[in-house]
């Protein structure tokens, strides 16, 4: 692994570079690169670091709003929440490493996203994670679930950051490629936000945190290729997380950031020292000289190549103001972390690396960073499924409460308590709404404000119709935040797709982006940060298109926030929005006709009614007329009713005026969008219905809360404790085997 | 000199991790595993060259920090 | 009245304890860094939850051997009240201030959830405002909360009435089903012989406000304010 290695076509291919890209390298360098330089090009131009397939489309997303302080391009997005405070957040995938080694893969994913947030000056205050696993029958699924969940908990719990929400679904499309998307939200002062751009010729470049070992060399290129039978042999490239060191790094950085010594700071994530130093220099238009002998090393005899490409965790690179080294070092000494001046900023526009007295690499920064390839990959528009579905067969003929019991025990709808009880979701003592509801909520420390957060995506919709699916992911995140009474402010996207070199996969990507963009504009919900994970394919089989949306919103007074639990008897249950019984792509259909391979149309997303209905619901919550609120999503209306009843341990008598010509099951379990359930005190319901009418919002009484059962007029009843057994039973039983 | 310390739970102290490993072995079809006890090995590189001095110092390390005498036993191996 | 919170590397409930003390005592607690060799004179020392030293080796083991813990032991022996919560309980037991040990949870998993605790006695500084034998709802969040002690130690704890809290159901019944982690005799917290040191796995500082889901933790701090002022 040293610079005497001859650059052959084979070596170039091993670095994931094609002939055109190598020709571009020769052009930029004006000579043949040496091995270290080739390694640097390969990680900087990997899909993971360069977004070469996705850039063209990501640029089309709406990213601005008056409250957006910083959109995509930095470590995370920044929004203003008033009172001089900013929220900094992002979601990032760690899919490939988590499949290979679920505990460490998930743990380092959580560690990485937290660094992205605190490198900008924000103390992390909430974590979420969106997980997708293969079929529950697949032999690896249990092992992957157990490892991923304990890895996320192991890291987040030690860091003392509450993990408050997320999602977990199962589908055979993820058998060979699970998705582990982790989101962190941090809180900063608006006048103390730190960016990565370097400036000031001669200023010291400082390395802090853990030592560098041979971890995860070529992780970024691994995340940019398909899996094949050999991938499982790539174990040594998996990084190991040390949350203890990261907790110290967080506290040390917070202490340093309270001073005035930092010019720029960047965490060392994928592609480690290479990516962080290039990014800082390139953003500041500077040159860099690094002395690799000064890099703290965990293993003997590391080469320049290995140091530059190592993905050892818990490290940061920063540029300090002149003459601050001693004072800054004292802080890191206190926290017993390495602190080493590894280089200086120059005006050459070049990155020059020295090791053992020799120049081992000399690369022009701007051409490398800016001229990284950008592809307009061929794509074909996905033909949106148009077929309208009807459910037939034995399940369709069952009573709705029987179907409800069966649905509550399906992997997608069963309670995920088994997962979130392994996460400390209350540390920091500000958790207002714990996991298991719509959006989670944490109080903004030292204020009365609440920060709502959620992650959402319905991949089966995206597969059938990427544009509708893209819209729906954004709309559902917005709806979940709205259902707490909070105002949705912005979101982050984690785009998980298959191989972008296949036009039909690229078509899914383009379609989802189109739908997301439309919804973001209609709902004033810009995308301020994100991450792309492509090549989620195994032996040619791609995952479902999965553009996960992580959303945040704010409520001024946490005492006004709504939760899903029924609060008392004799409250009136009201459904907001049109219930049409759309069963295509519904979980009810999946249960009733598991072998039906027809791609039916997913529910349409009418952004205008999303907006109108959501704004109405939020106004009602803030006005204090709503006693409980829940958005209606996967599983449909009756699932949402059951979740509200179970959460409050109060039953409900339903007397719905559904249309007699349709099937009651379609009506109860269809997944029409833009709907909410809410309850109101017995004296308020008429006023609320009238207010809805004047606002042009469809609202209808469904029934009255009370008792210990859910009953439907002329369709029987079921005890809450039986429902709870179905809902809570599935996951612990599944994982016990 | 190198010291290798084995720390094991005392007999009679429930070992949930050992039990879980035993269960897992059983479900993989490895029958006839009557008991599993899980402990840890700690390796030290010592500057000390005298075996007796090393043993007594490592012994103290074990009692003070490396083992919890309420639930754990330890043994020390020294290699020069 | 003066209070202190000890901060170890990777303590992570130090701020939570600080806020709880501030809001009940009405004054700022002193945050004491583990490397400090001296301990200011205070009336109450809180050892907060977290993962001191990453919980590496054994939970609490390395923190128990830090210089500041020698000071805490000295102060505890002088009668200063010491409250160890979660990792703080693990540290107190590793330091020998409390008997027994906290082992890995019986299900081997980290567990974060509200549990019910039966208040075994209310004649101590920590429980003065609770009703004896009542059930209070307090969350746990730990990986190593499974209390273990040998038979003699356990008999001694019972004989001297040193068990502070036992896991119970909502009605106050101490049952196997209410035991979240395999703790011997459902023990969730214990006192030292002089009743001035309490170690408990549950986190009273997390349920101090109705907006956050409950207030059953508040009487512990409020009671300490009253007892220490008397």
Image: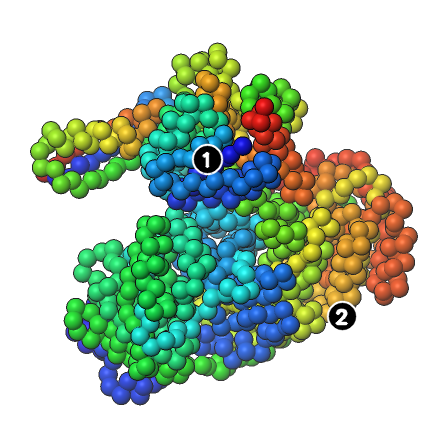
Residue A417 versus residue C26: which sits nearer the camera? C26
Q: Position of residue C128 (x, y in %)?
A: 60, 23
Query: Is A684 displayed left or right of A357 in the figure?
Result: right
Answer above or below: position of C26 versus A613: above
Query: Is A208 displayed left or right of C200 in the figure?
Result: left
Chain containing mark 2: A
Query: Is A644 displayed left or right of A251 in the figure?
Result: right
Q: Are marks 1 and 2 on the same chain?
A: no
Q: Residues within 10 Å of mark 2 (few under 14, many from 20)?
A: few
- The answer to whether any part of residue A576 appears in the image is yes
Color style of the picture: rainbow
Residue A599 versus residue B38: which sits nearer the camera? B38
Q: Position of residue A43 (x, y in %)?
A: 35, 71
Mark sitting on residue A589: none
Mark sitting on residue C47: 1
Count the marks: how many? Answer: 2
Q: At 30% from the left edge and 56% from the top edge, which residue is drawn? A: A338
The image quadrant of residue A330 is bottom left
Answer above or below: position of C76 versus A191: above
The image quadrant of residue A510 is bottom right
Which element is circle 2 on?
Answer: helix
Chain containing mark 1: C
Q: At 27% from the left edge and 74% from the top edge, which residue is drawn? A: A289
- The answer to whether any part of residue C177 appears in the image is no
Q: At 24% from the left edge and 67% from the top edge, which residue is drawn? A: A292
The alpha-carbon separation of the residues under discs 1 and 2 comes to 54 Å
Answer above or below: position of A160 versus A601: above
Q: Residues within 10 Å of mark 1 (few under 14, many from 20)?
A: many
The quadrant of the picture occupied by the N terminus of chain A is bottom left
User: Residue at label 2?
Assistant: A608
């Amino acid at each position: 692994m040293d610079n005497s290695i001859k650059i052959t076509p084979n070596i170039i291919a091993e670095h994931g570079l094609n002939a055109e890209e190598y020709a571009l390298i020769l052009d930029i360098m004006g000579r043949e690169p040496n091995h270290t330089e080739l390694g640097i090009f390969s990680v900087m131009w990997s899909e993971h670091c360069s977004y070469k397939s996705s850039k063209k489309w990501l640029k089309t997303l709406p990213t601005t709003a008056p409250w957006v302080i910083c959109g995509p391009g930095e470590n995370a997005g920044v929004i203003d929440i008033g009172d001089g405070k900013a929220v900094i957040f992002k979601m990032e995938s760690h899919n490939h490493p988590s499949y290979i080694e679920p505990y460490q893969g998930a743990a380092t994913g959580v560690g990485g996203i937290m660094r992205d947030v605190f490198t900008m000056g924000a103390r992390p205050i909430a974590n979420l994670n969106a997980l997708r696993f293969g079929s529950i029958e697949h032999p690896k699924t249990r092992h992957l679930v157990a490892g991923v969940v304990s890895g996320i908990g192991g890291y987040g719990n030690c860091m003392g950051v509450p993990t408050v929400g997320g999602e977990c679904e199962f589908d055979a499309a993820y058998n060979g490629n699970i998705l582990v998307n982790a989101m962190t939200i941090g809180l900063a002062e608006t006048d103390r936000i730190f960016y990565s751009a370097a400036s000031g010729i001669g200023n010291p470049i400082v390395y802090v945190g853990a030592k560098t070992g041979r971890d995860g060399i070529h992780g970024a290129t691994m995340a940019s290729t398909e899996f094949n039978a050999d991938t499982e042999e790539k174990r040594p490239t998996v990084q190991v997380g040390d949350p203890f060191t990261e907790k110290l790094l967080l506290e040390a950085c917070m202490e340093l950031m309270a001073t005035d010594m930092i010019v720029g700071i960047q965490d060392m994530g994928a592609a480690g020292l290479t990516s962080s130093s290039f990014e800082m220099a390139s953003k500041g238009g500077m040159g860099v000289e690094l002395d690799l002998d000064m890099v703290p090393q965990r293993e003997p005899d590391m080469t320049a190549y290995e140091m530059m490409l190592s993905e050892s965790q818990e490290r940061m690179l920063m540029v300090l103001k002149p003459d601050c080294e001693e004072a800054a070092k004292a802080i890191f000494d206190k926290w017993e972390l390495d602190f080493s001046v590894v280089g200086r900023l120059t005006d050459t526009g070049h990155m020059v690396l020295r090791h053992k007295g020799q120049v081992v690499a000399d690369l022009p920064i701007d051409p490398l960073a800016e001229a990284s390839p950008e592809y307009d990959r061929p794509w074909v528009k996905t033909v949106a499924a148009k077929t309208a579905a009807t459910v037939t067969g034995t399940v369709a003929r069952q009573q709705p409460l029987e179907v409800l019991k069966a649905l509550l025990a399906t992997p997608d709808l069963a309670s995920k308590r088994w997962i979130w009880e392994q996460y400390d979701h209350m540390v920091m003592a500000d958790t207002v709404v714990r996991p298991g509801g719509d959006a989670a909520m944490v109080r903004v420390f030292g204020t009365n404000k609440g920060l709502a957060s959620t992650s959402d995506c319905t991949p089966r919709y995206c597969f059938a119709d990427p544009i509708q699916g893209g819209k729906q992911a954004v709309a559902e995140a917005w709806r979940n935040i709205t259902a707490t009474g909070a105002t949705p402010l912005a979101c982050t996207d984690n785009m998980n797709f298959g191989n972008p070199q296949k036009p039909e996969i690229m078509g899914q990507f383009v379609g989802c982006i189109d739908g997301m963009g439309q919804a973001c504009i209609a709902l004033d919900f810009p995308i301020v940060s994100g991450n792309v994970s492509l090549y989620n394919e195994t032996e040619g089989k791609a995952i479902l298109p999965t553009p996960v949306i992580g959303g945040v919103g704010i409520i001024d007074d946490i005492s006004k926030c709504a939760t899903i639990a029924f609060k008392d008897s004799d409250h009136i249950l009201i459904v907001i929005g049109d219930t049409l019984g759309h069963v295509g792509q519904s979980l009810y259909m999946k249960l009733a006709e598991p072998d039906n391979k027809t791609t039916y149309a997913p529910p349409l997303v009418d952004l205008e009614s999303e907006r109108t209905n959501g704004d109405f619901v939020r106004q009602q919550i803030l006005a204090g007329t709503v006693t409980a609120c829940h958005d209606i999503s996967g599983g449909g209306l009756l699932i949402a009713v059951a979740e509200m009843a179970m959460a409050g341990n109060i039953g409900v008598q339903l007397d719905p005026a559904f249309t007699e010509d349709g099937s009651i099951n379609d009506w109860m379990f269809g997944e029409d969008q833009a709907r909410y359930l809410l309850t109101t005190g017995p004296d308020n319901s008429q006023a609320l219905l009238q207010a809805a009418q004047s606002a042009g919002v469809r609202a209808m009484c469904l029934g009255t809360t009370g008792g210990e059962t859910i009953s439907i007029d002329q369709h029987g009843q079921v005890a809450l404790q039986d429902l709870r057994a179905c809902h809570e039973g599935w996951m612990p039983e599944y994982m016990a085997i | 000199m190198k010291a290798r310390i084995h720390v094991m739970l005392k007999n009679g102290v429930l070992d949930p991790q050992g039990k879980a490993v035993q269960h897992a072995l059983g479900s993989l079809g490895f029958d006839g595993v009557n008991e599993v006890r899980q402990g840890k090995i700690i390796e030290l590189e010592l500057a000390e060259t005298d075996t007796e001095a090393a043993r007594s110092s490592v012994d103290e390390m074990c009692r003070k920090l490396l083992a919890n005498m309420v639930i754990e036993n330890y043994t020390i191996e020294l290699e020069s | 009245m003066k209070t202190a919170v000890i901060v170890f590397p990777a303590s992570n409930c130090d701020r939570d304890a600080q806020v709880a003390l501030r809001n009940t005592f009405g004054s700022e607690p002193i945050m004491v860094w583990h490397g400090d060799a001296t301990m200011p004179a205070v009336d109450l020392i809180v050892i907060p939850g977290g993962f001191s030293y990453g919980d590496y080796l054994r939970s609490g083991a390395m923190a128990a051997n830090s210089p500041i813990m020698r000071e805490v032991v000295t102060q505890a022996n002088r009668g200063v009240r010491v409250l160890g919560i979660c990792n703080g309980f693990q540290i107190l037991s590793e330091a020998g201030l409390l008997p027994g040990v906290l082992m890995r949870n019986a299900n081997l998993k980290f567990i974060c959830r509200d549990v019910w605790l039966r208040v075994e006695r209310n004649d101590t500084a920590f429980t003065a405002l609770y009703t004896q034998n009542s059930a209070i709802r307090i969350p746990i969040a730990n990986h190593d909360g499974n209390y273990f002690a040998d038979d003699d130690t356990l008999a001694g704890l019972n004989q001297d009435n040193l068990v502070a809290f036992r896991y119970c159901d909502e009605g106050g019944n101490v049952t196997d089903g209410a035991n979240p982690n395999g703790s011997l005799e459902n023990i969730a917290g214990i006192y030292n012989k002089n009743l001035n040191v309490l170690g408990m796995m549950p986190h009273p500082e997390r349920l101090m406000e109705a907006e956050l889901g409950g207030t059953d933790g508040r009487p512990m701090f409020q009671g300490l304010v009253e007892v220490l002022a008397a």
